[in-house]
Amino acid sequence: MNVYEAREEYLRAQKMGLKEHKERLSRGLDPEPAVLDEILKDSPMLSAVNVGLVDVPAGRIVGTKSAGRTGAFTAGFLPILGADSEFAIKWINLCAAHLSDEGIRDPVVCFEYLGNFYVQEGNKRVSVLRYFGAPRIPCMVTRLMPEPSEDPRIVTYFEFLEFYQVSRIYDVQFRKPGDYAKLLSYLGKDPAQEWDEREQKTFRAYYTYFKEAFDSLQGYRLDLLPEEGLLIWLRVHPFHDLGQLSSMELKKTMSALWENLVAAAQDEPVQVLTQPEPEEKGGILSKLLPVGLDHIHVAFVHPRDLSTSPWVTGHEEGAAHLQRVLGERVVVRSYFHADTREQAEQILEEAVADGAQVVFTTTPQLSRATLKAAVDHPKVRFFNCSVDAPYSSVRAYYSRVFEGKFITGAIAGAMSDNNCIGYVGSYPIFGVPASINAFALGAQLTNPRARIDLRWSCMAGQPVKEFMEKGIKVISNRDVPTPNKMYLDYCDYGTYMVCEDGSLKPLGSPCWMWGKFYERVIRALLKNGLDYGRDSVQAVNYWWGMDSGVIDVSLPDSLPEGVFYMARMLRQGLRKGAVDPFNRRIIAQDGTVKNPGHRGFTPEELLHMDWLVENVEGHIPTFEEVQPFAQAMVRELGIYRDAIPMEKEGQL
């Protein structure tokens, strides 16, 4: 290429640069490259590590070390100075060299900070190479190491360093802890397993393919990185599909998932609804053009079956309630033994083929199969019984069990004659610490000296036997799955007392009223149509409580009259919103004040509670302490799930 031709290339590059400059200004974005010195001006001295020669992804070069030349480039390193400037002449000469046999040989000198690169020497080389679409640019890299901290971005960066140690991949830079572990699981890689050259090339090619499709659908307009979008896509599709789908097919799969990507890009991706949505009053137009349905087909998909799972029994009683109260307006079908992901996907397809318009999947372990079915069948409404689910295609639902636990804790405190109460926790998942703490606060309400001995059914051991051997006479075990008194009277559920003769006496338990929940949801869809509520840009999680009638407390007639009356008063207060178990001064086990006593907690604070109050003796188990049968649930909803090793799934 001669200098005249190189000058023509500069003019084209400058035109592109001026357009980018204008567009970024119109979108409120900085039109110039970032400056590392400005980013770090208030930071403490950072340690430097010589990384050596690295083929850096061109898009990761986001700025310059100092502010000296930023006015010559756009943020994308396109030139904007006049064609007769000294800068332009040097750019033109580099361009001619690049397209000749000589080429650009000298590597760029740059600093890496938090996964991005800032040029110290070679800005024009970067500009020329990026203009001609070079995917990677050789750089001599010095890494600036941040101080370890609890900042999620810093935690994630140190996870990246471990990821890079084995993969040598700079292309993906996550912002949330745990995302590298998720990616490795989807790729079928162990965290310590080194990648060979073929695996590196395959991942880079597939990720670039995905990113191009993401950008072509204007994903760059979302506050969502392409690599974060990839994790959502991999929730539904295997990684190797990226090597088999055409560009059009890939974009189609991404379009089907788009509302989930939009939800994930929100500052608050999950909207927790603690009460049923108010029924909208229809105007004149809605009366002339009714959107409701005469009848609706509802499917319930369960793991296991009625003979082996009280949990399934509770939901099936809810399904029977739905059929009973709505009669011919609903067709209800139930499907069992969705015990593996493959079985769940097959059964969900069967339910849709049978005509289901609304599908309820009744355990968190079915959430992934539910998401895939929802993406594949966008006209069908899907609900999954879980919490903290960030996908807008599927609505999650659960109940505020802690309200019932507060009441049974108050009963336990009143009935304990030695101030010691045993508590069997289920799983260390979202919402469970709130239930433990509410129970402990309830016990404190009636017995300020009450201490809660916490054990876990998901850990090794026999908690109830151990409590009895310690002389603990009041024990809180798993909650009754239905209002059926049989479960409470049996005393394998709920809170009960160990009598002197060794017999067990029921004291009460929270109980789910799933039928009330299903009835309210289906009535809303019958009245407003299947598209009711679809306009939310957030993922919606229902977390209803006693004020909605979806959770209650089963109380035995044998309770002392005063204790029974107190429990009824607390239940009435919770139903009316006059009682809040957490609106008081609360001190945690480590002595920190979690609540000075002037407010309650938000739903998000309650769901993500990961500490225990001061009168609880015990701890929240780590993943390693949990028995194998519970690990799938804890991986899905564990309060420390971001730190849990993921199971390998795919193959790179």
Image (spheres, rainbow, N blue to C red):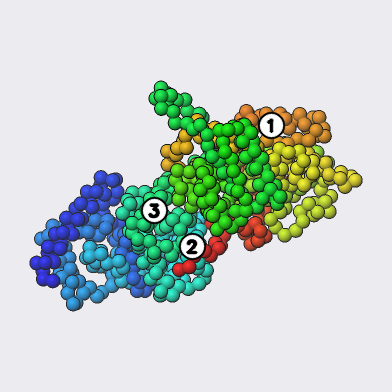
- Residue at mark 3: 254
Q: Quadrant of the C terminus?
A: bottom left
- Residue located at (31% from left, 64% from top): 58
Q: Which residue is mark 2?
A: 186
The mark closer to the camera, 3 or 1, is: 3
Residue 161 against residue 150 in the figure, above or below = below
Which residue in the rendered view is the most extreme toward the bottom? 101
Q: Which SS class for mark 3?
A: helix
Which label sits in the foreground, 1 or 2? 2
Cα distance, mark 3 to mark 1? 47 Å
How far across and how far down the image is residue 193, in percent?
50, 72
- Mark 1 and mark 2: Cα distance apart in space: 45 Å
Residue 328 coordinates in the image, percent (x, y): 58, 33
Q: Earlier in the sequence, mark 1 or mark 2?
A: 2
Structural crowding at the residue carrying mark 2, measured as other residues with C-alpha within 10 Å and reported as few (<14), some (14–19) or many (≥20): many
Number of marks in the rendered image: 3
Query: Which mark is first along the chain, 3 or 2?
Result: 2
- Disc 3 residue crowd, few under 14, some 14–19, many 20+, Cα 10 Å: many
Observer-nearest of 415 and 222: 222
The residue that label 1 is drawn on is 571
Q: Is residue 80 visible?
A: no
Tell whether 89 sits left or right of 398: left
634 is higher (above) or lower (below) than 450: below
Q: Position of residue 190 (x, y in %)?
A: 52, 68
Q: Amino acid at mark 1?
A: Arg
Q: CA distance from mark 2 to mark 3?
A: 17 Å
